[in-house]
Image (spheres, rainbow, N blue to C red):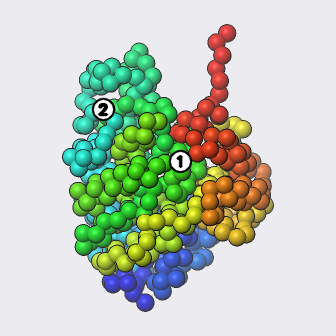
Amino acid sequence: MTIGPIGKVLVANRGEIAVRIIRTCAELGLGTVAVYSAADADSAAVRLADQAFRIGPGPAKRSYLHIPAIIEAARATGADAIHPGYGFLSENPDFAEVCEAEGFVFVGAPAAVMADLGDKSTARALMAAAGLPLLPGSREPLDSADDAQRLADEIGYPVIIKAVAGGGGRGMRVVRASGDFAAAWQDTRANAAAVFGDDRLYVERYLDSARHIEVQILADHHGTVVHLGARDCSLQRRHQKLVEESPAPGLSDDVVEAICAAAVRGATAVGYVGAGTFEFLLDPAGRFYFMEVNCRLQVEHPVTEMVTGIDLVAEQLRIAAGLSLALPHDFATPRGVAIECRINAEDPAREFAPAPGTLTECVLPGGPFVRVDTHVGPGYAIPPHYDSLLAKIIVWAQDRPAAIARMRRALAEISMGGIGIATTAEFLHDILDHPRFVAAEHDTALIGALTEPVHIDS
């Protein structure tokens, strides 16, 4: 079977997201190719795909980030399209351009749009021009530490220093006092240069107490742009999301409608095509501010799928094939509540230090309305080269109290063991019982307040 020009899809990724994409392709009758590193030779994606192609050794720079190897795999296997998943090359405009130049359909946003929105400073300027509200800060990258210091002093503390090329919770630093700014600026610039190869920075006001709200959008090549509602991603540790839910709880209909309309307006203004996510901060007074756009599928996309009944990967493929959106008339009206918890190989008792090893025991939950997206099982050796995500547990229920109860039950069923193995499952089970989360009064500071070490002056 084909969808437009797409008959076979190469998945340029690994882990649970590769498995998730392969499954949708199989349901659509599309052929699949899994690429893999030496560390993933026995992976679930390799087992499930129609074909598999080794692209290099374990380190990502020599495999999943190595564009020539991925293009060669697509050529050798006769793939028509390349789906990048999330992470790795998913927001790399150069990769998108190479795919198209080599005759492959890139399942993602256009390279030019991705380049503009991936540059956080350019994205801010574009969204400001589209009328989206921004936190006070610089519209352009700041050239010098002195200029940045003057702006920070003018804005007032706390401020956050952000890398223009940053993302995924990396390349940012909160500064709470003027005297700490210069050192923080230099450290962030050096880190940005090392991690992203781009040391440009900007500064904006930092909200200590905020909700992190994001809007899932879909846009086709024919000018149709729609939103699929709002998600809450406020439970974070050091800007890394741990729990997500849809619809975003505790918000008035007016606020949700305004945020979703802003996302559609922003996407339309830049000619967005594909699946994407507009991220916002919501302050305690109910004012929202544009933060960034993720030009890819999000880790937390399943909660939107659960409350809309829409397969976002299938929609990505339809859009990439040049087809028009064909969604049910009530697609933007959520049904029930969905919550996702990320199970990582990290030890909460040791400040979330990585806890790799071999899973000698791996029991994951099941039962009514419980979805598990994973690539692991008994005997799985957690590679040291990649993200520590082991599984995503997603539940659905008619209302929020029932969804929380279902997720706590599901988390309690998890049993993952092995030498050196620790996971976040028990920690998340406890967090979901926190009174502020239960009352939908949580924010981005909650987990930090509970987990950061307390320093007492002697």
Q: Which residue is mark 2?
A: 137
Q: Residue at x 76, y 63 (%)?
A: 363
Residue 31 vs 276, above or below: the answer is below
Q: Amino acid at mark 1?
A: Gly
Q: Residues within 10 Å of mark 1 (few under 14, many from 20)?
A: few
The answer, for residue 292, to whether it is visible in the render is yes
In the depicted view, which residue is nearer to us: 141 or 128?
Answer: 128
Q: Which x, y percent locates residue 204?
A: 35, 32
Q: Which x, y percent locates residue 129?
A: 21, 46
Q: Which residue is mark 1?
A: 250
Q: Residue at x 36, y 22 (%)?
A: 156
* Image quadrant in which the N terminus is located: bottom left
Q: Are marks 2 and 1 in contact (CB under 8 Å)?
A: no
Q: Which x, y percent locates residue 162?
A: 38, 36
Q: Amino acid at mark 2?
A: Gly
Q: Is residue 417 left or right of residue 369?
A: right
